Each structure stands twice: as structure tokens, then as C-alpha cells.
Image (cartoon, rainbow, N blue to C red):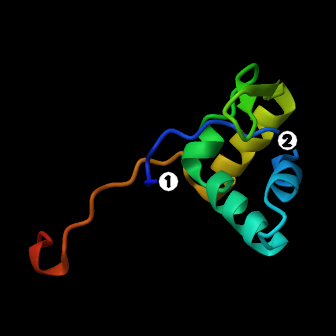
Amino acid sequence: MPKGKWKRPLAVGIHLHVFEAAPDLSRTQVRKAIGDYIMGPMYQRNLKAGVFRIDLNGEPLGEVTPEQEQRARRLIQRKGWNRRRKPTLPSFQKAA
């Protein structure tokens, strides 16, 4: 998925659905792919209480709980993803 693209919350335990739907995939590959999808600022920012989580077919399966939203906010804070970054200039263009 392209960076910066809006990411929908996945169903809790979706890795088990993937294992069942695609038994030929290694569990390590599945966990890594899901981890790459969920462990970024865009995904974590979209974990808002009451938002539907989706299954493998894109259908609603559960909702984000207030506790999950709070956990996401703490992760965002800890990782510093809530800070606005100043654009950095290449070294040859930096002001004196």
C-alpha cells in the first residue's frame, strides 16, 4: 500500500483468517505483512473508537474500542508521530 494512503482498521485476529484462507503462505510472511500495515502512523491515527474494522473481504467485522484508541494514541505519542516535521533543506541550501 502506498505511503500516506488511508488505512482501514483490520479485524482483530485477522492473521488467523489469512492462515485459513492461504495455508500456502508462511506464518512469518503473513505476520510481517500485517505488521507492516498496522505499525505506522496512518493506521494508528485511524484507530478511533466506534470505527468499523474490516475482514479479508472488506466487510465490517467488529469495531475499534476506546481502549484500542487510547493504546494507539499512546503509541503515536511515544513514537513522536504527532509532531509536525519541519522540511529539511539539503546541506548546500541551508541558511547561514
Lower position in the chain sequence, tag 1 or tag 2: 1
35, 27: nearer the viewer? 27
- Say few, some or many: other residues with alpha carbon within 10 Å of mark 1 (under 14 / 14 to 19 / 20 or more): few
Q: Locate residue 40, reporting x and y percent.
A: 60, 54
Query: How many numbered markers are drawn?
Result: 2
Element at label 2: loop
The quarter holding residue 80 reads bottom right
What residue is shown at x 86% (from left), y 32% (from top)? 67
For image coordinates 18% across by 79% down, the residue present is 91
Q: Secondary structure at mark 1?
A: loop
Q: Nearer the viewer, residue 75 or 44?
A: 44
Residue 34 position by quadrant: bottom right
Residue 34 as seen in the image, left or right of residue 96: right
Q: Quadrant of residue 92?
A: bottom left
Residue 60, position as x, y percentages in the image: 74, 25
Q: Nearer the viewer, residue 64 or 60?
A: 60
Q: Mark 2 — residue?
A: 12
Using the image, determine if residue 20 lies above or below residue 46. Answer: below
**At label 1, which amino acid type do we have?**
Met
**Residue that mark 1 sits on:** 1
